[in-house]
């Protein structure tokens, strides 16, 4: 098992990524290809103890930043760590690819270089969404801003397979994110997708109200990328806003300051439950090889989790199962 | 100033509505028409002190429940409190209408009976959305599940007028809810709406990320009804989920129980800030007369606030200003 790791474009620099790679080698026994500036990476690697032949370097002098326009960047920055890494993946020089870089570019690069599985109409970006009951697997969270009902059916199929094979959920329930539970609710897209899902052999439980998503209403939440991204970003925004509001309330008097101090560890444990980094990265589903987008500010721990995730992704032959089950 | 008040279809029964009406008469000096079962209302009114000629009753023997199919209910339940109330409004027997009943039916009834302002392509349901900085005015929150870019421009125009005239915001900033701030972000609908808004003479500040909406990023948030409803429902869902999660954390040990007790009033004050009932109801914009949807579980306080809102709505000639400013 060899994982290709993009060391560039991270908010935290390559140091955390190298550390995560070493933890991946030592704890998970995987081989790693680090893509980035060879000199810097060699110097960084020399600080650590690890079986030397488990990590190799693919030199890249250029990188794609978050400010780069995704499609142009993939086309023009041929020597960037992301393009070189994806090309190595496409050529079979590794079993999976992890990047913390520009999400749009990773999507574009995945489509142009790694390419879609035959029969898959659109690739989807997915994520583990933490809920009160544990987590839901949600897709598409932003790969496609305009979708057709058929895409949503394919997202549901891919999400069901990933949830079962990688996340270990038995016969995952599939919910269609909507503004009401009854059949016929929602816009034209979801009304049509509802019918397709009903006719499928998935464990479809119907429309799920967005209000109930944070509680944990279905194992897989299917939506178009515009809605999925809205749900994800608003969840983050609400968490941030509620925490700062609570903090203000809690520090408004001496008594409440004292109370807040006593609750500090509880508040922290609550916040940790919302930490997306615990769950690794966001897989791109529908491509011919495993590609995972890790959070831009991933630390070594998050990188190791993303490596573990892409390893499971590859170990469980998700791509083959999707290829067999996708309808087109 | 005469406000027509639907006394049926509320989760709390007509008692709270009658009490809210009396508070409206005594505190705001408005006249009220109560629509509902005459005998019951007379008996309820006899419990209170108020200037008797300020409240009249319009008898209705039937009502529209939340389970009724909206369009069918408006067409068939001709003697329902909602239909009779809206008809009285359309005939000029009152200056505004408030109902706690079936939202879809109120929308359908508003369109069929009160009718749209000339030039308005779609009516929008709007709400005051509480934020960290105060509030934003958001529309459409669910009247139209499939929208065109031109509708969003009209929603922005109506929202700007309402925000300025009723909520007292000077030259309100208009933000287009989106999944990124740059021009060109989002789906086809918002990309086109962006251009129309840019060309308008509104105080348009561009795309606003849904993540930033809870902080308070713009005075008016414009979106299609599917997205607006998603934002509203997820905000409620997140608040509910975070409160129960916090409650669990806070009662997990003796120390934290004690801490939670000390923070109780702060938690309550925080929760009150999220209370939609403080802000009255959701106005339906684009109709020829003021119509406001109050929350289904409105208490007397919320009803009085909704009466105050429809009074300001009418006092400030919003309908005329919309009629003059709408582009079609």
Image (cartoon, coloured by chain):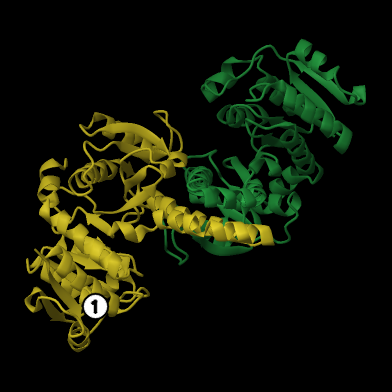
Chain colours: A green, B yellow
Please give the count of numbered marks on the rendered protein.
Answer: 1
Residue B201 in the image: state x and y as whole percent: 20, 31
Which of the image's four quarters has the C terminus of chain B? top left
Which of B277 and A76 lies nearest the eye of the viewer? B277
Q: Give the residue number, with chain letter if any, for mark 1.
A: B76
Residue at the location (22% across, 36% down)?
B171
Residue B18 in the image: state x and y as whole percent: 23, 76
**Secondary structure found at label 1:** helix
Please give left or right for residue B15 compared with residue A13 in the image.
left
Residue at the location (26% across, 45% down)?
B155
Which of the image's four quarters has the N terminus of chain B? bottom left
Residue at the location (25% across, 57% down)?
B283
Residue A52 in the image: state x and y as whole percent: 91, 22
Up/down of B207 relative to A45, above or below: below
Please give left or right for residue A165 compared with residue A104 in the image.
right
Residue B293 in the image: state x and y as whole percent: 27, 63
Up/down of B39 relative to B106, above or below: below
Residue at the location (14% across, 50% down)?
B318
């Amino acid at each position: 098992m060899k994982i290709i790791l993009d060391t560039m474009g991270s908010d935290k620099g390559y140091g955390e990524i190298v550390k995560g790679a070493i933890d991946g080698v030592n704890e998970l026994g995987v081989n790693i290809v680090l893509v980035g500036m060879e000199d810097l990476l060699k110097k960084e690697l020399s600080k650590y103890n690890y079986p030397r032949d488990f990590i190799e370097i693919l030199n890249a002098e250029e990188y794609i930043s978050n400010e780069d326009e995704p499609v142009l960047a993939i086309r023009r920055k041929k020597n960037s760590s992301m393009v070189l890494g994806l090309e190595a993946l496409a050529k079979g020089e590794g079993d999976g690819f992890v990047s913390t870089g520009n999400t749009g570019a990773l999507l574009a690069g995945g489509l142009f270089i790694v390419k879609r599985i035959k029969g898959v109409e659109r690739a989807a970006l997915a994520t583990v969404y933490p809920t009160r009951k544990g987590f839901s697997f949600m897709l598409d969270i932003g790969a496609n801003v305009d979708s057709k009902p058929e895409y949503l059916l394919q997202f549901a199929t891919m999400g069901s397979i990933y949830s079962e094979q990688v996340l270990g959920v038995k016969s995952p329930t599939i919910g269609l994110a909507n503004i009401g539970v009854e059949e016929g609710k929602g816009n034209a897209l979801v009304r049509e997708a509802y019918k397709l899902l009903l006719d499928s052999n998935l464990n479809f439980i119907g429309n799920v109200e967005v209000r109930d998503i944070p509680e944990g209403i279905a194992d897989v939440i299917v939506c178009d990328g515009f809605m999925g991204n809205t749900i994800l970003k608003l969840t983050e925004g609400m968490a941030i806003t509620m925490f700062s509001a609570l903090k203000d309330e809690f520090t408004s008097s001496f008594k409440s300051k004292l109370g807040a101090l006593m609750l500090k560890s509880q508040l922290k444990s609550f916040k940790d439950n919302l930490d997306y980094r615990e769950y690794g990265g966001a897989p791109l589903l529908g491509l011919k090889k495993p590609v995972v987008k890790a959070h831009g500010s991933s630390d070594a721990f998050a990188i190791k989790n993303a490596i573990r995730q892409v390893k499971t992704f590859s170990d469980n032959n998700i791509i083959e199962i999707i290829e067999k089950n996708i309808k087109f």
